[in-house]
Image (cartoon, rainbow, N blue to C red):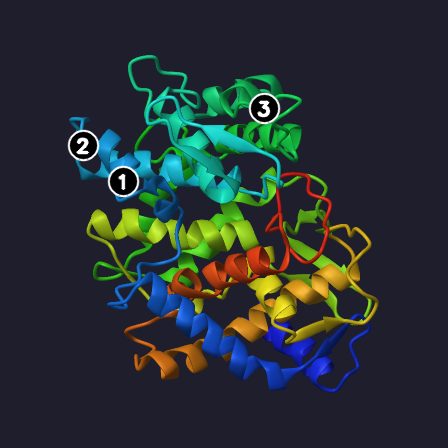
Amino acid sequence: MRSRANEVFALAEADELDDWTLNLDALSSCADFVSEVVRKRYPKLDVPFHARWRHFVFGGRDLWREIASEVSWRDTDANARAEFDLAITSVLLDAGAGASWRFEDPSTDLIAIRSEGLALASLRLFEWGGFSAEPTDPLRADAEGLARLNGAALGDAFQVRETNPLEGLDGRARLLNRLGQTVDARPDLFALRDAPRPGGLYDVLRGRAVDGALAAPIILEVLLEALGPIWENRPTLDGAPLGDCWPHPQLGYVPLHKLSQWLAYSLIEPLEAAGVRVVDIDGLTGLAEYRNGGLFIDASVLIPKDGTARPHNVSDPAIVAWRSLTLALLDRIAPMVRERLGVSAEQFPLARVLEGGTWAAGREIARAKRAHGGPPLLIHSDGTVF
């Protein structure tokens, strides 16, 4: 992903990319803005990793911790498998919700939108046993529970109605159905120590650790192998599904794997809580999604050559190039942000830069520039990419 992103960056730097102009003069002021956002959000610079777990915290209340603390877990591994189940299902439901949707939590009276709303809705569905086929064990996802979920049931759980539309609802349900089918078909990956469940990947990853340490890129490698078959309408090469990897006329195939990498980051904490030390976290890349990528457009680091008014498909060459440029630019802005904050790469890996950070800055600048706070590009969503 990094190698191809750097190829895209080189083309843009030479002004040979069809759809984008690169304005590196604006990168310094963009880094200033990101650093200001980090200091405002985390005055002590105690930034956690960019992970799904952040979205379960509202007003200082960690809702997942409240749920988990009431459970008498059989052992640490059982807790970790449940957290894998939650992270995997919640992240796969995390593609952009659209500007109109919101979730009203009946347990707390919280009203949440966008990624936080999707997190809260998926957490409640998980808590209620919506992914489990075991009535006595609701805090799990399993092959049968995932396979029986449909768009209507998911819509009810996510409070979807005509006045509260959620983009890509049926696509999200099908994605979880395919996850259930894949889990059932690969006991070697999902059922080493339990019945087939997404959380079975915990046992695979624990087994890959060497002297108690696991390199973060191995998490991504396992996810790409395990989840490759779940993606609908993706390119294939010699019969192999490529996932979030798209052809570009100037570049060939461009790998991006946004949701898989978001999930890889989100599995670090359950692994470490179970005693597996995760290393080489910067072996993962940034995330090629509309908050990070929107930041660079809104900060005039990336300038579209044909404007931003028309809607795009995820597979459009302009979108593929933009997302890959986002990865390259995140690698370049990260050391600039660290320098401004006075921290090292060891203290402040990319996962903290994203959280502190570019993702939050992308959201903030979007709100300043557009009343609805949406991305600078209109992209058709099927509920499985952004």
Residue 112 image position (x, y, % from top left): 45, 36
Q: For residue 141, say whether it is visible.
A: no
Regarding mark 2 in the picture, which secondary structure is present there? Answer: loop
User: In the image, is 94 to the left or to the right of 357?
Assistant: right
Q: For residue 156, say whether it is visible.
A: yes
Judge whether 321 appears above or below 51 on screen.
below
User: In the image, is 252 to the left or to the right of 68?
Assistant: right
**Tags 3 and 2 touching, CB below 8 Å:** no
Question: For the residues carrying marks 3 and 2, which lies nearer the camera in this image?
Answer: 3
Q: In terms of depth relative to the viewer, which is nearer, 142 or 303?
A: 303
Q: Which of the 4 quarters of the picture holds residue 156?
A: top right
Q: Amino acid at mark 3?
A: Val
In space, the residues marked 2 and 1 are separated at their CA atoms by 11 Å
Residue, disc 3: 160
Q: Which of the marked residues, 3 or 2, is nearer the chain's N terminus? A: 2
Residue furthest to the top = 135
Residue occupying image coordinates x 40% and y 26%: 105
Residue, disc 2: 69
On-image quarter of the N terminus: bottom right
Q: Which of the 4 quarters of the picture holds residue 101?
A: top right
Residue, disc 1: 62
